[in-house]
Amino acid sequence: MKQRFLKTTTLLFVHLFFAAATFAQQTVTPATALKSYLNNADTSFRYELKDSFDIKDVKCYSILLTSQKWREYTWTHQLAIFVPANVSYDGALLFITGGSVKNGQPNWNGPTDDLYQQIASMATTNKAITAVLRQTPNQPLFKNLTEDALISYTLHQFKEDGDYTWPLLFPMVKSAVRAMDAIQSFSKEKLSQNVNRFVVSGASKRGWTTWLTGANDNRVAAIAPMVIDVLNMPVSLDYQIKTWKEYSIQIEDYVKLGIPQAAHTEGGQSINTMIDPYSYRQLLTMPKMIFMGTNDEYWVVDNIKNYLDSIPGKNMLNYTPNAGHNLGDKKHAFEGLSAFFGHTLSQQAYPACSWTTSTRRGKVKLTAKATADQLVDVILWTANSTDLDFRNEKWSSQSLGLAHQSTVKVNAPLPDSGYRAFYVDLQYVNPTGGTYSVSTRVFVTDTKKIL
Protein backbone atom coordinates (compact mmCIF):
# COMPACT_ATOMS: atom_id res chain seq x y z
CA MET A 1 0.00 0.00 0.00
CA LYS A 2 1.31 3.38 -0.94
CA GLN A 3 -0.60 6.37 0.21
CA ARG A 4 0.52 9.95 0.54
CA PHE A 5 -0.96 12.66 2.60
CA LEU A 6 0.33 15.79 4.23
CA LYS A 7 -0.92 16.73 7.67
CA THR A 8 -0.41 20.14 9.23
CA THR A 9 -2.26 20.81 12.45
CA THR A 10 -3.74 24.28 12.69
CA LEU A 11 -4.57 23.93 16.36
CA LEU A 12 -0.97 23.02 17.05
CA PHE A 13 0.21 26.20 15.35
CA VAL A 14 -2.23 28.25 17.41
CA HIS A 15 -0.84 26.62 20.55
CA LEU A 16 2.71 27.28 19.39
CA PHE A 17 1.90 30.92 18.65
CA PHE A 18 0.56 31.62 22.11
CA ALA A 19 3.31 29.59 23.80
CA ALA A 20 5.92 31.48 21.81
CA ALA A 21 4.33 34.80 22.70
CA THR A 22 4.44 33.88 26.37
CA PHE A 23 8.11 32.91 26.23
CA ALA A 24 8.99 36.00 24.21
CA GLN A 25 8.03 38.07 27.22
CA GLN A 26 10.43 36.16 29.45
CA THR A 27 14.18 36.37 29.71
CA VAL A 28 15.76 33.08 28.71
CA THR A 29 18.06 31.55 31.33
CA PRO A 30 19.84 28.20 31.46
CA ALA A 31 16.96 26.86 33.56
CA THR A 32 14.33 27.90 30.98
CA ALA A 33 16.33 27.51 27.76
CA LEU A 34 15.06 24.04 26.82
CA LYS A 35 11.43 24.88 27.48
CA SER A 36 11.88 28.12 25.57
CA TYR A 37 13.24 26.22 22.59
CA LEU A 38 10.42 23.68 22.68
CA ASN A 39 7.87 26.50 22.66
CA ASN A 40 9.45 28.68 19.99
CA ALA A 41 7.52 29.94 16.97
CA ASP A 42 8.74 27.27 14.54
CA THR A 43 5.95 26.13 12.22
CA SER A 44 7.75 23.56 10.09
CA PHE A 45 6.16 20.47 11.71
CA ARG A 46 4.50 18.16 9.20
CA TYR A 47 4.36 14.50 8.31
CA GLU A 48 3.66 12.44 5.23
CA LEU A 49 2.91 8.74 4.88
CA LYS A 50 5.44 7.31 2.45
CA ASP A 51 4.91 3.56 2.58
CA SER A 52 3.59 0.64 4.58
CA PHE A 53 4.65 -2.97 5.01
CA ASP A 54 3.95 -5.98 7.21
CA ILE A 55 6.15 -7.63 9.82
CA LYS A 56 4.26 -10.85 10.58
CA ASP A 57 0.87 -9.68 11.89
CA VAL A 58 2.00 -6.10 12.49
CA LYS A 59 1.34 -3.31 10.01
CA CYS A 60 4.14 -0.75 9.78
CA TYR A 61 3.44 2.75 8.51
CA SER A 62 6.60 4.50 7.37
CA ILE A 63 6.27 8.26 7.72
CA LEU A 64 8.44 11.17 6.64
CA LEU A 65 8.43 13.53 9.61
CA THR A 66 9.63 17.12 9.52
CA SER A 67 10.15 18.00 13.16
CA GLN A 68 11.54 21.54 13.09
CA LYS A 69 13.96 24.04 11.70
CA TRP A 70 17.00 24.33 13.95
CA ARG A 71 19.37 27.10 13.00
CA GLU A 72 19.84 26.77 9.21
CA TYR A 73 18.82 23.10 9.12
CA THR A 74 15.36 21.61 8.59
CA TRP A 75 15.24 18.29 10.44
CA THR A 76 13.59 15.30 8.77
CA HIS A 77 13.13 11.80 10.11
CA GLN A 78 11.81 8.38 9.30
CA LEU A 79 9.06 7.60 11.81
CA ALA A 80 7.91 3.99 11.73
CA ILE A 81 4.60 3.26 13.48
CA PHE A 82 3.84 -0.40 14.27
CA VAL A 83 0.20 -1.41 14.71
CA PRO A 84 -0.61 -4.95 15.90
CA ALA A 85 -3.73 -6.83 14.83
CA ASN A 86 -5.29 -6.14 18.22
CA VAL A 87 -4.83 -2.82 20.04
CA SER A 88 -6.10 -2.87 23.63
CA TYR A 89 -4.47 0.21 25.16
CA ASP A 90 -4.26 3.97 24.67
CA GLY A 91 -0.51 4.00 25.32
CA ALA A 92 2.37 3.71 22.87
CA LEU A 93 6.10 3.02 22.99
CA LEU A 94 8.35 5.57 21.29
CA PHE A 95 11.89 4.28 20.74
CA ILE A 96 14.34 6.97 19.65
CA THR A 97 17.37 6.00 17.60
CA GLY A 98 19.98 7.45 15.26
CA GLY A 99 20.50 7.39 11.53
CA SER A 100 21.63 9.82 8.89
CA VAL A 101 20.31 12.27 6.32
CA LYS A 102 21.48 13.03 2.80
CA ASN A 103 20.53 16.15 0.89
CA GLY A 104 18.06 16.99 3.64
CA GLN A 105 16.23 13.65 3.47
CA PRO A 106 16.46 10.70 5.87
CA ASN A 107 18.18 7.54 4.73
CA TRP A 108 15.39 4.97 4.83
CA ASN A 109 15.21 1.61 6.61
CA GLY A 110 12.90 -1.22 5.60
CA PRO A 111 11.16 -4.27 7.09
CA THR A 112 14.35 -6.32 7.51
CA ASP A 113 15.79 -3.83 10.02
CA ASP A 114 16.59 -5.69 13.27
CA LEU A 115 15.29 -2.90 15.49
CA TYR A 116 12.03 -2.78 13.55
CA GLN A 117 11.62 -6.53 14.04
CA GLN A 118 12.11 -6.20 17.80
CA ILE A 119 9.85 -3.18 18.28
CA ALA A 120 7.15 -4.75 16.09
CA SER A 121 7.27 -7.85 18.29
CA MET A 122 6.69 -5.65 21.36
CA ALA A 123 3.58 -4.27 19.69
CA THR A 124 2.13 -7.76 19.27
CA THR A 125 3.15 -8.93 22.74
CA ASN A 126 1.64 -5.92 24.49
CA LYS A 127 -1.32 -5.26 22.18
CA ALA A 128 -0.32 -1.65 21.75
CA ILE A 129 1.13 0.71 19.17
CA THR A 130 4.90 1.06 19.09
CA ALA A 131 7.09 3.40 17.05
CA VAL A 132 10.71 4.04 16.10
CA LEU A 133 11.96 7.57 15.49
CA ARG A 134 15.18 7.68 13.48
CA GLN A 135 17.65 10.45 12.55
CA THR A 136 17.87 11.84 16.09
CA PRO A 137 19.87 13.93 15.67
CA ASN A 138 19.88 14.83 11.99
CA GLN A 139 23.45 14.22 10.91
CA PRO A 140 26.00 14.86 9.56
CA LEU A 141 25.94 18.62 10.18
CA PHE A 142 28.58 21.37 10.28
CA LYS A 143 31.16 19.83 7.94
CA ASN A 144 30.29 16.18 8.52
CA LEU A 145 30.11 16.13 12.32
CA THR A 146 28.10 13.27 13.85
CA GLU A 147 27.15 11.88 17.27
CA ASP A 148 29.41 13.01 20.15
CA ALA A 149 31.53 15.20 17.88
CA LEU A 150 28.37 17.03 16.84
CA ILE A 151 26.93 17.40 20.34
CA SER A 152 30.22 18.59 21.80
CA TYR A 153 30.63 21.11 18.98
CA THR A 154 27.27 22.68 19.79
CA LEU A 155 28.09 22.89 23.49
CA HIS A 156 31.39 24.54 22.64
CA GLN A 157 29.56 27.03 20.42
CA PHE A 158 27.32 27.93 23.35
CA LYS A 159 30.41 28.55 25.46
CA GLU A 160 31.71 30.83 22.71
CA ASP A 161 28.67 33.05 22.12
CA GLY A 162 26.06 32.28 24.82
CA ASP A 163 23.29 31.52 22.31
CA TYR A 164 20.82 29.34 24.21
CA THR A 165 19.61 27.57 21.06
CA TRP A 166 22.97 25.87 20.47
CA PRO A 167 22.82 22.66 22.57
CA LEU A 168 21.99 19.83 20.17
CA LEU A 169 19.98 18.07 22.87
CA PHE A 170 17.29 20.73 22.43
CA PRO A 171 16.33 19.82 18.85
CA MET A 172 16.80 16.16 19.73
CA VAL A 173 14.13 16.51 22.43
CA LYS A 174 11.92 18.45 20.06
CA SER A 175 12.25 15.62 17.55
CA ALA A 176 10.75 13.26 20.14
CA VAL A 177 8.00 15.76 20.99
CA ARG A 178 7.07 16.12 17.32
CA ALA A 179 7.14 12.35 16.89
CA MET A 180 4.56 12.04 19.68
CA ASP A 181 2.48 14.74 17.98
CA ALA A 182 2.60 12.81 14.70
CA ILE A 183 1.81 9.45 16.32
CA GLN A 184 -1.23 10.89 18.07
CA SER A 185 -2.50 12.64 14.96
CA PHE A 186 -1.87 9.72 12.59
CA SER A 187 -3.36 7.17 14.99
CA LYS A 188 -6.52 9.18 15.44
CA GLU A 189 -7.00 10.26 11.83
CA LYS A 190 -5.97 7.08 10.01
CA LEU A 191 -6.30 4.27 12.55
CA SER A 192 -9.21 5.52 14.67
CA GLN A 193 -7.04 4.89 17.73
CA ASN A 194 -6.44 7.34 20.55
CA VAL A 195 -2.92 7.50 21.94
CA ASN A 196 -2.87 9.44 25.20
CA ARG A 197 0.37 8.38 26.91
CA PHE A 198 3.84 7.23 25.98
CA VAL A 199 6.67 5.13 27.24
CA VAL A 200 9.80 6.72 25.77
CA SER A 201 13.10 4.90 25.32
CA GLY A 202 16.39 5.21 23.48
CA ALA A 203 20.08 4.42 23.92
CA SER A 204 23.16 6.57 24.50
CA LYS A 205 22.49 10.12 23.19
CA ARG A 206 18.91 8.98 22.61
CA GLY A 207 18.81 7.80 26.23
CA TRP A 208 19.93 11.30 27.18
CA THR A 209 17.10 12.61 24.99
CA THR A 210 14.70 10.21 26.73
CA TRP A 211 15.45 11.69 30.16
CA LEU A 212 15.00 15.26 28.94
CA THR A 213 11.81 14.45 27.02
CA GLY A 214 10.30 12.87 30.12
CA ALA A 215 11.06 16.00 32.11
CA ASN A 216 9.46 18.31 29.55
CA ASP A 217 6.35 16.60 28.16
CA ASN A 218 3.47 15.46 30.36
CA ARG A 219 2.31 12.86 27.82
CA VAL A 220 5.28 10.74 28.92
CA ALA A 221 3.92 8.18 31.39
CA ALA A 222 7.23 6.34 31.88
CA ILE A 223 10.77 6.36 30.53
CA ALA A 224 13.35 3.67 29.80
CA PRO A 225 16.70 5.38 29.13
CA MET A 226 19.56 3.14 28.05
CA VAL A 227 23.36 3.38 28.52
CA ILE A 228 23.52 7.02 29.58
CA ASP A 229 24.91 6.50 33.07
CA VAL A 230 26.12 10.08 33.58
CA LEU A 231 23.41 12.02 35.41
CA ASN A 232 24.71 14.53 37.92
CA MET A 233 27.30 15.20 35.25
CA PRO A 234 29.94 17.17 37.16
CA VAL A 235 30.10 14.49 39.87
CA SER A 236 29.87 11.57 37.43
CA LEU A 237 32.63 12.92 35.20
CA ASP A 238 34.86 13.77 38.16
CA TYR A 239 34.30 10.18 39.28
CA GLN A 240 36.00 8.95 36.10
CA ILE A 241 39.14 10.88 37.05
CA LYS A 242 38.95 9.62 40.64
CA THR A 243 38.51 6.01 39.52
CA TRP A 244 40.48 5.70 36.28
CA LYS A 245 42.80 8.73 36.60
CA GLU A 246 41.52 9.85 33.18
CA TYR A 247 38.32 10.42 31.24
CA SER A 248 36.91 7.61 29.13
CA ILE A 249 38.35 7.64 25.62
CA GLN A 250 34.75 7.42 24.44
CA ILE A 251 34.08 11.02 25.51
CA GLU A 252 37.24 12.46 23.99
CA ASP A 253 35.21 14.72 21.66
CA TYR A 254 34.00 16.58 24.75
CA VAL A 255 37.39 16.47 26.46
CA LYS A 256 39.16 17.98 23.44
CA LEU A 257 36.82 20.98 23.68
CA GLY A 258 37.19 21.29 27.44
CA ILE A 259 33.55 20.50 28.25
CA PRO A 260 33.96 18.19 31.30
CA GLN A 261 37.00 20.08 32.57
CA ALA A 262 34.91 23.26 32.76
CA ALA A 263 31.93 21.66 34.52
CA HIS A 264 32.47 23.67 37.70
CA THR A 265 32.92 27.04 35.97
CA GLU A 266 30.08 29.49 35.38
CA GLY A 267 29.80 28.49 31.72
CA GLY A 268 30.00 24.83 32.58
CA GLN A 269 27.30 25.18 35.21
CA SER A 270 25.05 26.79 32.59
CA ILE A 271 25.56 23.79 30.32
CA ASN A 272 24.81 21.40 33.19
CA THR A 273 21.62 23.28 33.99
CA MET A 274 20.47 23.05 30.38
CA ILE A 275 21.30 19.46 29.45
CA ASP A 276 21.94 17.39 32.59
CA PRO A 277 18.76 15.42 33.37
CA TYR A 278 19.74 15.70 37.03
CA SER A 279 18.94 19.42 36.80
CA TYR A 280 15.34 18.48 35.96
CA ARG A 281 15.03 15.75 38.58
CA GLN A 282 12.07 17.34 40.37
CA LEU A 283 10.12 16.79 37.14
CA LEU A 284 11.24 13.18 36.74
CA THR A 285 8.54 11.63 38.89
CA MET A 286 7.34 9.09 36.32
CA PRO A 287 8.28 5.38 36.61
CA LYS A 288 11.62 4.46 35.06
CA MET A 289 13.54 1.41 34.00
CA ILE A 290 17.20 2.33 33.51
CA PHE A 291 19.24 0.01 31.26
CA MET A 292 23.02 -0.43 31.38
CA GLY A 293 25.75 -2.81 30.27
CA THR A 294 28.19 -4.01 32.91
CA ASN A 295 31.15 -3.42 30.58
CA ASP A 296 30.11 -0.10 29.10
CA GLU A 297 33.34 1.62 28.13
CA TYR A 298 31.80 5.07 28.62
CA TRP A 299 31.01 4.92 32.35
CA VAL A 300 32.43 3.76 35.68
CA VAL A 301 30.66 0.53 36.58
CA ASP A 302 29.09 1.78 39.83
CA ASN A 303 28.55 5.39 38.77
CA ILE A 304 24.80 5.20 39.30
CA LYS A 305 25.43 5.59 43.04
CA ASN A 306 26.15 9.26 42.29
CA TYR A 307 22.54 10.04 41.43
CA LEU A 308 20.05 7.18 41.79
CA ASP A 309 18.86 7.99 45.31
CA SER A 310 18.18 11.62 44.34
CA ILE A 311 15.83 10.79 41.45
CA PRO A 312 12.18 10.74 42.56
CA GLY A 313 9.60 8.15 41.57
CA LYS A 314 9.76 4.41 40.95
CA ASN A 315 13.23 3.61 39.63
CA MET A 316 14.17 0.15 38.37
CA LEU A 317 17.49 -1.01 36.93
CA ASN A 318 18.34 -3.60 34.32
CA TYR A 319 21.98 -4.59 33.72
CA THR A 320 23.05 -6.68 30.75
CA PRO A 321 26.05 -8.73 31.93
CA ASN A 322 29.20 -8.89 29.81
CA ALA A 323 27.85 -6.27 27.43
CA GLY A 324 29.18 -2.87 26.51
CA HIS A 325 27.56 0.29 25.22
CA ASN A 326 25.59 -1.63 22.58
CA LEU A 327 23.95 -3.97 25.15
CA GLY A 328 25.06 -7.01 23.16
CA ASP A 329 22.27 -8.51 21.08
CA LYS A 330 19.80 -6.44 23.14
CA LYS A 331 17.66 -9.50 23.89
CA HIS A 332 18.08 -9.20 27.67
CA ALA A 333 17.40 -5.46 27.67
CA PHE A 334 14.42 -5.70 25.33
CA GLU A 335 12.84 -8.41 27.48
CA GLY A 336 12.94 -5.89 30.31
CA LEU A 337 11.69 -3.05 28.11
CA SER A 338 8.74 -5.09 26.86
CA ALA A 339 7.76 -6.07 30.41
CA PHE A 340 8.10 -2.48 31.60
CA PHE A 341 5.95 -1.30 28.70
CA GLY A 342 3.33 -3.92 29.52
CA HIS A 343 3.16 -3.02 33.21
CA THR A 344 2.81 0.66 32.31
CA LEU A 345 0.03 0.00 29.81
CA SER A 346 -2.00 -2.19 32.17
CA GLN A 347 -1.20 0.01 35.17
CA GLN A 348 -0.28 -3.08 37.14
CA ALA A 349 2.10 -2.67 40.04
CA TYR A 350 5.72 -2.79 38.98
CA PRO A 351 7.81 -5.55 40.58
CA ALA A 352 9.68 -4.76 43.75
CA CYS A 353 13.44 -4.39 43.92
CA SER A 354 14.69 -2.36 46.86
CA TRP A 355 17.67 -3.31 48.96
CA THR A 356 19.86 -2.67 51.97
CA THR A 357 23.43 -3.78 52.58
CA SER A 358 25.71 -4.43 55.53
CA THR A 359 29.28 -5.72 55.71
CA ARG A 360 30.40 -8.24 58.29
CA ARG A 361 32.87 -11.11 58.60
CA GLY A 362 34.26 -10.80 55.09
CA LYS A 363 30.91 -10.63 53.33
CA VAL A 364 28.43 -8.09 52.08
CA LYS A 365 24.92 -9.07 53.12
CA LEU A 366 22.32 -7.73 50.70
CA THR A 367 18.66 -7.93 51.67
CA ALA A 368 16.20 -7.21 48.86
CA LYS A 369 12.44 -6.79 48.80
CA ALA A 370 10.81 -8.74 45.97
CA THR A 371 7.37 -9.43 44.52
CA ALA A 372 6.89 -13.00 45.70
CA ASP A 373 4.23 -14.28 43.30
CA GLN A 374 6.27 -13.25 40.23
CA LEU A 375 9.80 -14.07 41.44
CA VAL A 376 11.28 -17.16 39.75
CA ASP A 377 15.00 -16.85 40.53
CA VAL A 378 17.68 -14.70 42.15
CA ILE A 379 21.05 -14.44 40.40
CA LEU A 380 24.29 -13.08 41.85
CA TRP A 381 26.65 -11.57 39.26
CA THR A 382 30.30 -10.90 40.15
CA ALA A 383 33.49 -9.69 38.48
CA ASN A 384 37.01 -9.34 39.86
CA SER A 385 39.76 -6.87 39.02
CA THR A 386 43.22 -5.95 40.25
CA ASP A 387 42.22 -2.28 39.95
CA LEU A 388 39.01 -0.25 39.76
CA ASP A 389 38.63 -0.59 35.99
CA PHE A 390 36.07 -3.32 35.29
CA ARG A 391 35.46 -2.50 31.62
CA ASN A 392 37.27 -5.59 30.32
CA GLU A 393 36.49 -8.00 33.14
CA LYS A 394 34.29 -11.08 32.77
CA TRP A 395 31.16 -11.36 34.87
CA SER A 396 30.11 -14.74 36.29
CA SER A 397 26.66 -15.73 37.49
CA GLN A 398 25.39 -17.87 40.33
CA SER A 399 21.75 -18.88 40.45
CA LEU A 400 20.64 -18.93 44.08
CA GLY A 401 17.47 -20.92 43.43
CA LEU A 402 15.29 -18.53 45.40
CA ALA A 403 11.72 -18.09 44.17
CA HIS A 404 8.37 -16.81 45.42
CA GLN A 405 9.85 -14.95 48.37
CA SER A 406 9.10 -11.39 49.38
CA THR A 407 12.48 -10.96 51.07
CA VAL A 408 15.69 -12.41 49.67
CA LYS A 409 19.07 -12.43 51.38
CA VAL A 410 22.29 -12.69 49.42
CA ASN A 411 25.84 -12.99 50.75
CA ALA A 412 28.56 -11.63 48.47
CA PRO A 413 32.05 -12.48 49.75
CA LEU A 414 34.67 -9.75 49.74
CA PRO A 415 37.76 -10.49 47.62
CA ASP A 416 40.96 -11.80 49.18
CA SER A 417 42.83 -9.17 47.18
CA GLY A 418 42.08 -6.48 44.65
CA TYR A 419 38.49 -5.49 43.97
CA ARG A 420 35.17 -7.14 43.30
CA ALA A 421 32.02 -5.79 41.67
CA PHE A 422 28.65 -7.45 42.14
CA TYR A 423 24.95 -6.98 41.66
CA VAL A 424 21.85 -9.10 42.11
CA ASP A 425 19.20 -9.83 39.49
CA LEU A 426 15.66 -10.56 40.60
CA GLN A 427 14.23 -12.64 37.77
CA TYR A 428 10.51 -12.20 37.28
CA VAL A 429 7.92 -13.90 35.13
CA ASN A 430 6.37 -11.58 32.56
CA PRO A 431 2.54 -11.80 32.48
CA THR A 432 2.71 -11.71 28.66
CA GLY A 433 5.22 -14.58 28.52
CA GLY A 434 8.86 -15.23 29.29
CA THR A 435 10.98 -13.71 32.04
CA TYR A 436 12.91 -10.52 32.64
CA SER A 437 15.23 -9.11 35.28
CA VAL A 438 15.23 -6.18 37.66
CA SER A 439 18.67 -5.48 39.10
CA THR A 440 20.13 -3.94 42.20
CA ARG A 441 22.78 -1.36 41.52
CA VAL A 442 26.36 -2.51 41.02
CA PHE A 443 28.48 -2.43 44.17
CA VAL A 444 32.28 -2.28 44.11
CA THR A 445 34.21 -3.61 47.11
CA ASP A 446 37.79 -3.86 48.22
CA THR A 447 38.93 -6.48 50.74
CA LYS A 448 37.12 -4.72 53.59
CA LYS A 449 34.03 -2.80 52.48
CA ILE A 450 31.77 -1.36 49.79
CA LEU A 451 33.43 1.62 48.18
Image: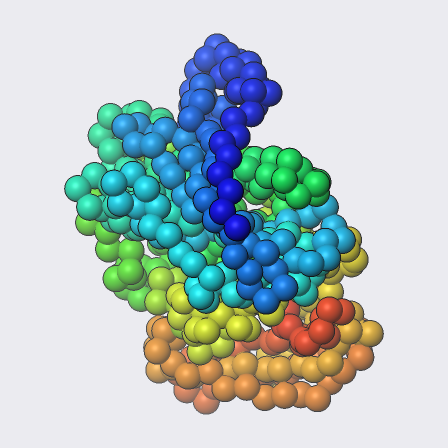
Is residue 30 rendered to the left or right of residue 288?
left
- Between 91 and 353, the residue placed more toward the observer is 91
Q: Position of residue 155 (x, y in %)?
A: 29, 38
- Between 260 and 145, the residue placed more toward the observer is 145
Task: Mark yes or no: residue 309 visible.
Answer: no
Q: Residue furthest left?
A: 143
- Residue 384, compared with residue 132, is above or below; it is below
- Residue 210, compared with residue 39, is above or below; it is below
Q: Position of residue 372 (x, y in %)?
A: 80, 74
Total marks in image: 0
Task: Mark yes or no: residue 436 visible.
Answer: yes
Residue at 55% over, 73% down: 332
- Between 229 and 234, the residue placed more toward the observer is 229
- Between 109 and 334, the residue placed more toward the observer is 109
Q: Position of residue 421 (x, y in %)?
A: 48, 77
Q: Position of residue 178 (x, y in %)?
A: 50, 36
Residue 344 occupies quadrant? bottom right
Instruction: State the scheme by which the image is colored.
Output: rainbow
Is residue 378 rendered to the left or right of residue 268?
right
Residue at 21% over, 39% down: 142
Residue at 44% over, 64% down: 113
Q: Residue furthest right?
A: 373
Residue at 46% over, 13% down: 24
